Amino acid sequence: MLPFGRHRTRPFFSLAVLLAALYLPNSAPVMAQAAADRTNRDVALLISEAEEYALEGNYDRALPLYERAIAELKSDPHPQNQLRYRYGIILNALGGQRPDLYPLARGQFEAVLDYIESSPGIPFEHSAARVRSAIAHTFHQESALQEHPGRRAVMLRHAYQLYAGAIEQLRAEQDWQNLAITSFNIGQVCEWQGNLEEAIQWLEQAVALDRQHGFPDLEEDQAYLTALRELVNPQQPTGNTAI
């Protein structure tokens, strides 16, 4: 079996890149009203301070500031849930060093999913399928840190079910990159569960999407697929082998 700790989470030292990437145009409602509205101005300052601490590695100072900012937005659920999603991504990225943050990340994503599903017709930049995949990823990553086999198995089962529930919707939405990532991740869950044949099927889908759309993970995903195939059908050694 391949190394159990291998998963798609990017190295921890790239948190600066992660935070920068999260400043998407869709996050503008929190920031654009800062000059006109005191609440949003206070929220913007809290977020700015939180991310300074996060980049310094001072998470004990950063995380309560994110939570205060989320609480300040309770009367404005759309930007509140934008920030919840952002905060969940950050918590998930930190979970490798602080496993106690995985349940907190799940809580943020679950609140966002409730908001999306209870507000049909209101545009939100992250689909329900993408949020389900994010929830699955928290279980997926946390499972790698579990020493108790039963606990690990439960987390992997939750991850599989959530990934599987997101796949068809991502395909229907033509969200090809998130579909490729989710196919990779569910394939890895299958491998960790010992189901190599199904793992190969999912990795084949990930590699096909990478190749079709030019995604940067093609080489990594192809190498993983090749390793899985070798586990299922190891090549026989050549030479003067006794029969």
Image: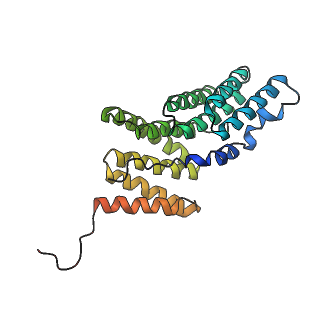
Instruction: Name the residue rendered at 83%, 35% in the picture.
Output: 32
In the shown orientation, is residue 33 left or right of residue 59?
Answer: right
**Is the C terminus in the top left, top right, bottom left or bottom right quadrant?**
bottom left
Q: How is the image coloured?
A: rainbow
Q: Is residue 123 visible?
A: no
Residue sticking out furthest to the right? 36
Q: Is residue 87 visible?
A: yes
Specify whether 115 is left or right of 181.
Answer: right
**In the image, residue 214 lies at what x, y percent?**
58, 63
- Horizontal and vertical percent position of residue 224: 42, 59
Q: Nearer the viewer, residue 46 or 238?
A: 46
Residue 3 x/y as whole percent: 37, 51
Q: Quadrant of residue 121?
A: top right
205 to 132, vertically: above or below: below
Whether 80 is drawn above or below 167: the answer is above
Residue at the spot x=47%, y=50% of the render?
A: 183
Query: How many numbered marks, from 0 up?
Result: 0
Q: Residue furthest bottom?
A: 240
Outermost residue, left side = 243
Q: Is residue 240 left or right of residue 200?
A: left
Name the one closer to the observer, 75 or 9. Answer: 9
Viewer-nearest residue: 175 or 230? 230
Provide residue 23's location: percent of width, then percent of height.
72, 42
- Judge from the rendering whether residue 191 lies leftward or rightward of residue 85; answer left or right: left
Nearer-the-camera pick, 128 or 140: 140
**Quarter-of-image position of residue 52:** top right
